[in-house]
Image (cartoon, grey):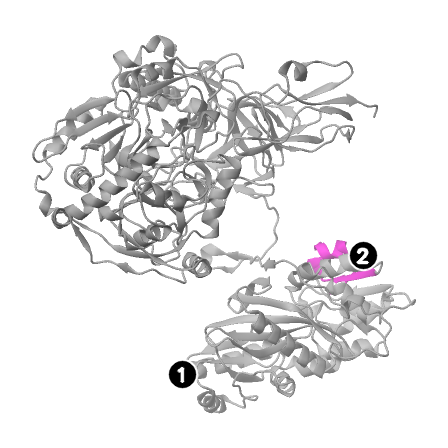
Amino acid sequence: MGQVDNLSVSSNEPMFKSVLIANRGEIAVRIARTLRSMGIRSVAIYSEVDRYSAHVTAADSAVALKGNTPAETYLRGDLIIATAKSQNVEAIIPGYGFLSENVDFAVQCEAAGICFIGPTPEQLRQFGLKHIAYEAAANADLPLLPHSELLADVEEAKLKAQTIGYPVMLKSTAGSGGMAMERCNDENHLVDVFSKVKRAAAKLYSDDGVYLEHCIDDARHIEVQIFGDGHGHVIALNERDCSLQRRHQKIVEETPPPNLSDNVRARLRDAAIRLGTSVKYRSAGTVEFVYDRTCNEFYFLEVNCRLQVEHPVTEATHGIDLIEWMVSLAAEEPPRALYSPPTPEGVAIEVRICSEDPLRNFHPSSGTLSQYQPNAVEVLTAGTYTTIQDYPGRVGHWDAGVPPSGPMDDYAFRLANRLVGNAENAAGLECTLVGPSLRFHISTIIAITGATMNAVLDGTSVDSWKPIPVQAGQILKLERSTSGCRTYIAVRGGFDVPIYLDSRSTFVLGKFGGYAGRILKSGDMLFIDKCISDSIPSSISDALIPHYPAEDEEWQVGVLYGPHGAPDFFMSDYIDQFFATIWQVHHNSNRLGVRLLGPKPTWSRSNGGEAGLHPSNIHDCEYAVGSINFTGDTPIILTQDGPSLGGFVCPVTIAKAELWKIGQMKPNDRIRFFPITFDQALTMEHDQDKSLATLTSSTTYIPLSLLSSSASTTFECILAQLPETATRPTVVYRQAGDHYILIEYGAMQLDLRYRFRVHLLMEELRDHHPVNGILELAPGVRSLQIRYDSRVIHQQQLIVALLAAEDRLPTEESDICVKSRIVYLPLAIEDSATLDAVKRYRETVKESAPWLPNNVDFIQRINGLPSRDDVRRIVFDASYLVLGLGDVYLGAPCAVPIDPRHRLLTSKYNPARTFTAEGTVGIGGVYMCIYGMDSPGGYQLIGRTLPIWNTFVNNTAFEDGHPWLLRFFDQVRFYPVEEKELSIQRDAFRQGRLSVRIVQDNVFNLGEYNAFLKRESESIANFTAKQAAAFAEEVSHWQLDDSRDRKYTVTNGHDIAETQQVIDGQVNVIADICGSVWKILVEEEGMVEMNAPVITLEAMKMELTVRSPIAGRVCSVLCHTGQLVAAGDVLLRIEPVEQ
């Protein structure tokens, strides 16, 4: 750095009074804005064609230059200086381009007594020609590429290129901006373009001088912003990456440059400062370098003695105004920050928009932009939980653990699309509890259906369940729901978002689909697709608008008994009690599942055997959407974003035509379930389809209570059963709603022969004898779930086809072989993420349990192992065979050790965890799982490995374009790594910079495996006997936690009568939904404004703001953080005050 002795940082002399801007467009507007902020009058110039350009009105005054082309106007220094004199300006600022680096113009300004805001003429001369700039760089000891001097002719160029080595760049010595240059692969190429480049240089820069430099192909373009005071003090204001270019033109500029080491960045800045200091550089400039990624070295390219187009990214990260710096320095008042530069913060990116026609190979598409009307909807406020969904969602990937997502209330969603003339699969908005505010940038037609929300269009209320014309510029605002839970907005054409795995639906937990894989946020722009339907928007019969129960009413929901009922799993009396109970919706319900409050189940067995300690545990099977899943003693309705594979029983499944009701249930709602037959469910679905097709109701509603009768006497969950034979295990066909059948093989125990029979049945139904109407096959450990369209094939017809398929299966086990890749994965035992998940469970769910405080200790104890090290040894010795995918979502394996002596037997969490980190490895029953994403879970946690889900498939380990790593019958083998190393590997693997070892040519032979079991039977028996004894001892100590008894109402920490008491002169602020108090934003005696937020409630995993209905003083706060409250409970009281 140079020392400043003769400059005052500030003075009492005034700044310039008037400055002329010798430019147009964006930079002229930008300069005018800064000059106005400095109190300096700005003068613009313009050509005839630019008379109505933005910079003309942005300046304080504007002067026309005679002519139309740049050569006639903006490049005429004499005209510009004459205009400056006529306007009595004291300085000229050129911006970038045009005359900004013109030495003659700078000299003419100074000769006319006008300050040129920029570098000195000598500096413009030194760096204006690149071959001369190379000399200055060499004198400053900057690294240079092999290059030539100016070339006399093509023959000299050929000789120099041989010395430098191909490829080479043939470049104009004058000008910048990536023009008049060509990359040459060989001598023939050089000869072909030599004259072309010289002509371009002469035309563009009036100088046909050219030279050669070595070309680096694997390169990045890095530049350093410098600023000097003209007396030897030069600073570097960080670096910018300008590598993303097309046709040598920068498209994206970013600071700081990503993936560039601190050492390289420091050396770049030092080099730029050395060069600037060596010439006592004045004002703003940019030193450009080319960075060779193959050797991590950089080389000087050129200096731009002006502002760059991308200068705002430097300003954004430093909090400065470079134009203000330039003007202040030119007025001999250098900015203080020049001598104490700010520390950069954050990241800034600039993207250039090119006016081109993509349909004509991106040819320039210039002309007058007479109108710009984006085909989009702008999100002003997003509401509590608004997502894009489509119908039927992401179906067809259930076997890999990908939930369908889609609308929770598909009935209202499909009706909305019908009302605007869309196909039923057009993407629309699902708005939960509180709706968004949307600005429409195009005239269109919308429909609002579902939960009742006050909808206002430009201040005028609009009706739901009708087509609504919307004009461009209008704003639609939806408020809090007053009836129901989810509102749907359809727009004609549907929302145009990328299709991911065959759907536009948002799966927020998986971070894919919809708009960027997330809920909407303020500022989002939702583009509208073209409507491909010729259907005319219609009105609907009032009979089609559903009734949502009032507070004193209950939902009535039709369900089918099964797949898991009495007496196999539940006591028969409990099934009767289940249907007699009025259940209550828990406040922690959402798109993953709806938790229910009600009586504890009574089980017909004491535990789940190999599947787990709790009687709800079963060997993992696929779930049906709409099944009521008992996770331990807690019933949860599995909904659109719920898990596909798991190890808990499901006694009933909601009928397809009734599922929409679950989407409209909110916390504290009451539900009664009524068992119905398959034929009744099928009739209901046909009626619903007809209503949606005709928009009329042709049927008379029959209350479910009249359709239903006693479950235990009339309904069966087993549709058919085959007894065991010498060549076949028992086969049970279980009803799982009206669109699923669950087939189970053998006794309720782990036997790989059953999984192989499942595999044979899948091949039979998929490859050999497909059945029309079967949509998907999803295997479990000893089961196969059939998803079918009951409107295409009746349940009984399907049973006949499945029985016939069973008869065709092979009978000889020894011949069965499957491909079984061996996948090696690193595992860090008990890493911090694993331990944090357990800690979080203790703090937020359950403080004590047999598996707490340490899961590995519990695994050791329940398996009768001598030490924790034995758990570790077994985990690393085991080869885990993948039997199912999607065990807690997204390709998560349900895998079992091939060797029974490696099968560590555990229970599952009860209740389940609310959070498990992606990549965590757990053991439940005897099964190993790797969590594919951050999610709830119940397995005992042992460590963490690599991500097994890669959303955009940017790693070659993920084959066939699938984002899930593992396949059925893969063998997973872990090897130990430390957490620090795993962290590095996880990042590299996610980015595609690290692969894993996979042995492809491996086969699992069932006959050989059976021989292994026979050979090792004595050792296996000894291990399992010891394990069983330890397991039995653990069970004897097992105590169910009575503190979590279900209750039918939510109670407060205050007396209800007291909280509901009305006090004269005070206004009650009440909860409008059941939930827990998340934050209290006011204090007693504090003052609040009308509509100010006072309480934040948490319900359905969302934060809901309660606002003050008046301005006043807070008299009393009647709730506390963490307290459960019901709709209508008084939260606080406010005494009004005069405004």
Q: What residue type is disc 1 on?
A: Asn
Among the two numbered marks 1 and 2 on one chain, the one whose residue lies closer to the N terminus: 2
Confirm or deny contact between disc 1 and disc 2 (CB under 8 A): no
Q: Is residue 298 left or right of residue 421?
A: right
User: Identity of the amino acid at label 2?
Assistant: Ser
Q: Mark 2 = which residue?
A: 37
Alpha carbon of mark 1 to alpha carbon of mark 2: how far? 56 Å
How crowded pointer 1 is (Cα within 10 Å; few <14, some 14-19, many 20+) is rated as few
Residue 410: x and y in percent read 42, 27
Q: Check if residue 808 falls in the magenta segment.
A: no
Q: Residues within 10 Å of mark 2 (few under 14, many from 20)?
A: few
The C terminus sits in image quarter = top right
Task: Return the residue nearer the eye: 726 or 548.
Answer: 726
Viewer-nearest of labels 1 and 2? Answer: 2
Q: How many tags in the picture?
A: 2
The spot of residue 523 in percent (x, y) is 60, 43
Q: Residue furthest right?
A: 12
The secondary structure type at the circle numbered 1 is helix
Residue 231 on image: x %, y %:
79, 79
Q: Which mark is residue 954?
A: none
Q: Which residues are magenta?
A: 41-66
